[in-house]
């Protein structure tokens, strides 16, 4: 079977930025450094789409586009918005993208996107096939995103960052942004993360936990404070995972 190059524009929409790059989804590579635009938490959907249009034009892109959105997405419609404007709730993001490009588009939860990329090309590659064990990918950033796989299949929109922990929302307790906001040292933050991971183990018994998000670069600073039954691995695609995974979603119906 030939592995023909497939080029798709992937866009990762986060709490603080939009990042876009053209991806080769057959090889799992970004073809250029991502372009990035800062966004604020209250940026309107209208301004977000205008920024996406600018990025598409800057990259001179005419072709399929995949967007990773930081909330629940079903059939292109955004159903939650924890760290972006609440105006997204109920909007059909897929239709909005169709207004920007005249080609195939897909919208997927941002953590599901990162998970797909890590499963296909990164730290969870060994679990990608039909014998794949239970994989929990977590993106630790402004919030906590989750992607959940069994036998190489994604169970979309799990939203495990919002389980209740100590009477509150887990992401308000253990996201990477909380470490900075509350000036926690690595040990203090890691013990919170560990508590969260152990709670997740009680609920879904993963075999492999992949930790992603910017903070995965500092894994050596907190690794020793984590103790789980599951193997813990660090995401290996870094920032590229969200972009590549969004591009992969165009050919992976979720
Ligand atoms: C959202 C998730 C998202 C995660 C990371 C959470 O607050 O509910 O959908 O994946 O943040 O962006």
Image (tube, rainbow, N blue to C red):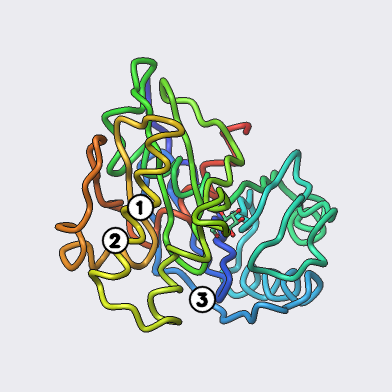
Image quadrant assignment for residue 151: top left
Residue 250 position in % (x across, y down): 60, 41
Q: Residue at x 34, y 23 (%)?
A: 133
Q: CA distance from mark 2 to mark 3?
A: 32 Å
Give the secondary structure at mark 1. Answer: helix
Identify residue for label 1.
195
Q: Along the line of sight, which residue is nearer the eye, 135 or 6?
A: 135
Q: CA distance from mark 3 to mark 1?
A: 34 Å
Q: CA distance from mark 2 to mark 1?
A: 6 Å
Q: Is residue 205 left or right of residue 123?
A: right
Residue 80 position in % (x across, y down): 73, 54
- Can you say which quadrant of the picture contains the C terminus? top right
Identify residue for label 2.
191
Q: Residue at x 35, y 58 (%)?
A: 193
Q: Which mark is residue 36?
A: 3
Give the secondary structure at mark 3. Answer: strand
Q: Are marks 2 and 1 in contact (CB under 8 Å)?
A: yes
In this rendering, the answer to whether 230 lies above or below 64 is above
In this rendering, the answer to whether 93 lies above or below 26 is below
Which is more N-terminal, label 1 or label 3? 3
Residue at mark 3: C-beta within 8 A of ligand 1: no
Categorize mark 2 by other alpha carbons within 10 Å: few (<14), some (14-19), many (20+): some
Quadrant hosting ligand 1: bottom right
Residue 38 position in % (x across, y down): 57, 81
Q: Which mark is residue 214?
A: none
Q: Residue furthest front?
A: 167
């Amino acid at each position: 079977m030939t592995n023909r190059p497939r080029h798709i524009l992937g866009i990762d929409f986060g709490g603080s930025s939009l990042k876009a790059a053209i991806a080769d989804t057959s090889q799992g590579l970004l073809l250029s450094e991502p372009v990035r635009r800062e966004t604020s938490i209250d940026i309107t959907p209208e301004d977000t789409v205008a920024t996406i249009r600018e990025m598409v034009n800057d990259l001179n892109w005419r072709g399929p586009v995949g967007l990773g959105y930081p909330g629940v997405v079903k059939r292109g419609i955004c159903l939650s918005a924890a760290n972006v404007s609440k105006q997204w709730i109920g909007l059909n993001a897929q239709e909005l993208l169709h207004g920007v490009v005249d080609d195939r588009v897909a919208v997927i939860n941002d953590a599901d996107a990162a998970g797909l990329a890590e499963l296909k090309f990164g730290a969870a590659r060994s679990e990608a096939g039909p014998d794949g064990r239970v994989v929990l990918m977590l993106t630790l950033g402004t919030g906590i995103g989750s992607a959940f796989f069994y036998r190489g299949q994604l169970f979309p929109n799990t939203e495990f960052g919002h389980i209740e922990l100590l009477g509150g929302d887990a992401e308000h307790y253990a996201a990477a942004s909380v470490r900075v906001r509350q000036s926690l040292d690595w040990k203090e933050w890691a013990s919170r993360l560990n508590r969260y991971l152990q709670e997740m183990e009680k609920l879904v018994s993963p075999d492999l936990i992949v930790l992603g998000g910017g903070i995965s670069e500092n894994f050596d600073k907190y690794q020793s404070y984590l103790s789980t039954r599951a193997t813990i691995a660090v995401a290996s695609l870094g920032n590229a995972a969200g972009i590549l995974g969004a591009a992969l979603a165009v050919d992976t119906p979720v």
